[in-house]
Amino acid sequence: MFGYLFKKIRYFSLKNKNECMLQNTKPGKNNSEPISPDLEKNLEVIKGILRDSSDVTTHEFNFGHDRKFKGALIFIDSLTDKAEIHKNILQPLMYDVLLLQNNVDMDFTKIDTIRKNLISTTDNLKVTLLSDLLDNLLAGAAILLINGSKEALVIKSEKRESRGIEEPGTESVVRGPREGFVENVKVNIALLRRKIKDTDLCIEKFVIGDKSKTDVYIVYIKSVANPKLIEEIRMRLKRIKIEAILESGYIEQFIEDNPYSIFPTISNSEKPDKVAAKILEGRAAILVDGTPFVLVAPMVFIESFQSVEDYYARPFFASVIRIIRFLSYIISTLGPAIYVALTVFHQELIPTQLLISIAEGRERVPFPAIMEAFLMLFAFDLLREAGVRLPKSVGQTVGIVGAIVLGQASVEAGLISPIMVIVVSSTAIASFAVPAQTDSGTILRYIYLALAGIAGGFGVIMGLLGTLLHLASLRSFGTPYLWPVVPLNFSGLKDVFIRMPLWAMSKRPKAIVWNDFDSNNQNPGLMPSPYKKDNIDSK
Amino acid sequence: MSIEKGKISSQQLLFLIAGFVQGSVLLIDFTVGLTEHQTWMVILAALAITTPVVLSYAVLAKRFPGMNLVQINDMVYGRFLGKVVSVYYIFFFLMTLSFNIRDVGELYTTFLMPDTPFVFLLVVFTATCTYAVTKGIEVLARISHLFVVTGIFILISTFIFLIDQMDFSKFLPFFELPFIRIFQGIHIVSMIPFGETVAFLIIMGCLNNTEHVVKNTFFGLLIGAVSLLIGAARNTAVLGRTQTIWTSPSFQSIRLIDIGTVLTRMDFLIGIGQTILIFLKCSLFFYVLVVAISQLLGLKSYLPLVLPLAAIEVIIAATVYQSPVDHTMITQNAGIIYSTPLVFIIPPLSLLIAKIRGLPKSERGKGT
């Protein structure tokens, strides 16, 4: 009963908090008014709202025959392309209008007349509400207001500095396309469209963030993706109430299935070919303006061990590399824990020769093995963090000083045993082989190490069982996280520990494409074979 | 009204039963002292005797789809007597679970970590089981095949590694031991690894489809029994008569593996395998216990019971026996006697009564 009361109290306190947040983020007053026909009044209102923004430019002008029509152009200096405004808006309105033969009768107080006869840009729209006008103005459009018209014309003339398409820093490949996503979401959509030229490719737009008004797009293939998945993503995106979205990580944290898990349930990538491949499998990509990291849902655990290059290389080597990745994840999480468990609790399992050399190395070490391991792992994580944040040239120096000088010195001083240095450095190397699970791997490494220090091999086994239970209970947008191993699916296993040839994997993953899974299936018998003599003869 | 909302498929039931029976590989040592080199015979005989009984559980579950043991008891024996029978079952689950938890502690303090405090091991192990139970039966059912595959892999690999040390003449002579010892051995084996599957009468209430339940129960039992048989045959073929003098013949035989001085000290393999299989068994038993009690008390969710019961289990397990020898003696001589009616008499009797009374009647199904 007390638990029930406690829950109620917590619920009410949370509810109040939520309401406070909502009130803070409500849009400002008088924005939902319609635009008035009086130009002076409109300008006054807009200037009143944006009075502290020095980069808002207002240009008033007269145009038409006899210059009898009054107009005003409002835009934000830093966001718009002025050359385009001059060429496509001001020049037609003020000079080209005189070339029209029957301009005398034309009524330029109607926005449609101007739009159809004079404006020469394709991307423009009419608005009637002040709030729409301001939204577009702040997004970089130029606004044309005409005296006597209740409407305003929004002309998209955004100028945006964009980084060139480069090879992504986080996912470099030996073989495969070198292009990566950029910060401009329009460019990113174009990159995906170039990969998938299909009429069913859907690109749905959402605007999230009360202050940042960030564009968020869901990209999926209508005929392949599960409609329930898309509906779920839409619903979760609509539920987000936040002031600003600055990176796709914000979206990820608001829509993920299990926020208390150390394992990510939504994957991210910087590579268009990877994202396109996942969309083709029936997943949905979430693109956020302002970041090159594209989210893909649902995610399964096995994806962390797959790389795009696995599919570009021939299957044999790809399978070997994949097994190495699995081993390296095991080493990176369990390495120090197994060392501690063996040296402290189960010395009888170590072959005698090895035991002697370990004992010799540890002879002068003043710490217990668990302390030694914690110190070394901490030092490694410190070095990594320092190396990442510092400028590149300094970062290398830190690496050399830390790894070589400090490591060597501490071994020679007898603070750390040489075997421990080997264990921790191989753990460190292994942890970089599976970049998608580096976060979870680092946390698990400390947990297993603590368990091994407390209860030896028994503790490690209990930790592994706990992790397995947790992983098996996770779901990502309805897909079991450990699919296809748990629950078992034989056709899915073709792409887990080994990578079968592409012609043997013609089906889409069943857990992701729940509905009518076998349609769109390619024909069997794709296996390449040399031309038989009969075939050539018959031709 | 059933408590658990989780649903399992009947294939998952197969793996759960197989893993559950495999989890008793360690407990087969209770009989080895009695039956020596004829253990394999005892296992086969016990399988032959138990199979119809275990299949009667499956038939019972098929007759009452979506209902667990406590609900079935209430329907078959009436409100009052049914509750009494259910309390008897709950006592059995409570004690068996604590014995199994104790087994893990004994395994580690005897063979792997002799200096570690006994209670500490019990607490860590029970905490992990508690975590599994709070995740529900679905998660356990989903990962059960991993446990079974690991168990079979360890059994077969150790069998192959030991082939050069096996001497099949150690099985001879066939009928040497007095019949009363064989009979007691058969009783133990049919009670402990096979008969404890009576716990599945609770889990079978979660089945989403009871169509193939009899077939899958049988194959699950068969996989488990064959695993036990391989283990017993391996120990006898390697150790012969000497297996009675070791505390755990399995450990001793695996220690003899020595292939080119590279593959040695493989007993950690059997340690890992037995730990995870007993973990599966204990988690299932724990789940069965909490569901049975909360069903009896009419609770909406079993979660509030999990932590208190975990604490009780640890305390019982830590204090119930003086020593491993005590444990073996009492299990051999007393433990199997009080649980015999639960395994061999009540479920077939329930089936019979249900058949005579024409249960379940649709209008009665709502009351319980």
Image (cartoon, coloured by chain):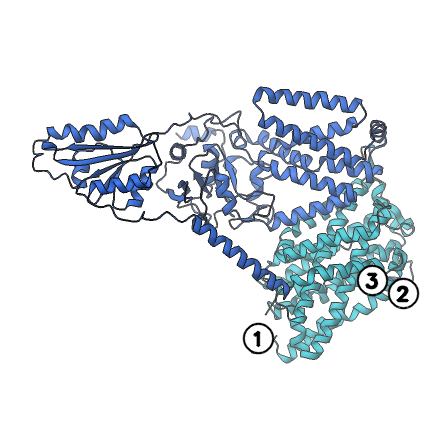
Chain colours: A blue, B cyan
Q: Secondary structure at mark 1?
A: loop
Question: Alpha-carbon neighbours of circle 2 within 10 Å: few (<14), some, or many (≥20)?
Answer: few
Q: Which residue is mark 3?
A: B188
Q: Say whether residue B91 is left or right of residue A190.
A: right
In the rendered image of this protein, does residue B306 appear above or below residue A257?
below
Asked whether the viewer can see residue A6, the reply is yes
Separation (CA) of disc 3 from disc 2: 12 Å
In the rendered image of this protein, does residue A16 appear above or below residue A274?
below
Q: Nearer the viewer, residue A421 or A522?
A: A421
Residue type indicated by callout 1 = Lys
Q: Say whether residue A130 is left or right of residue A316.
A: left
Q: Secondary structure at mark 3?
A: helix
Question: Alpha-carbon neighbours of circle 1 within 10 Å: few (<14), some, or many (≥20)?
Answer: few
Q: Quadrant of residue A365?
A: top right
Residue at 73% x, 49% y: name it.
Answer: B276
* Quadrant showing the C terminus of chain A: top left
Separation (CA) of disc 3 from disc 1: 39 Å
Q: Chain of mark 1?
A: B
Q: Which mark is residue B135?
A: none
Residue A207 at x, y percent in the picture: 39, 43
Residue type indicated by callout 2 = Ile
Is disc 3 in the same subunit as disc 1?
yes
Q: Say whether residue B194 is left or right of residue B258.
A: left
Residue A425 at x, y percent in the picture: 70, 28
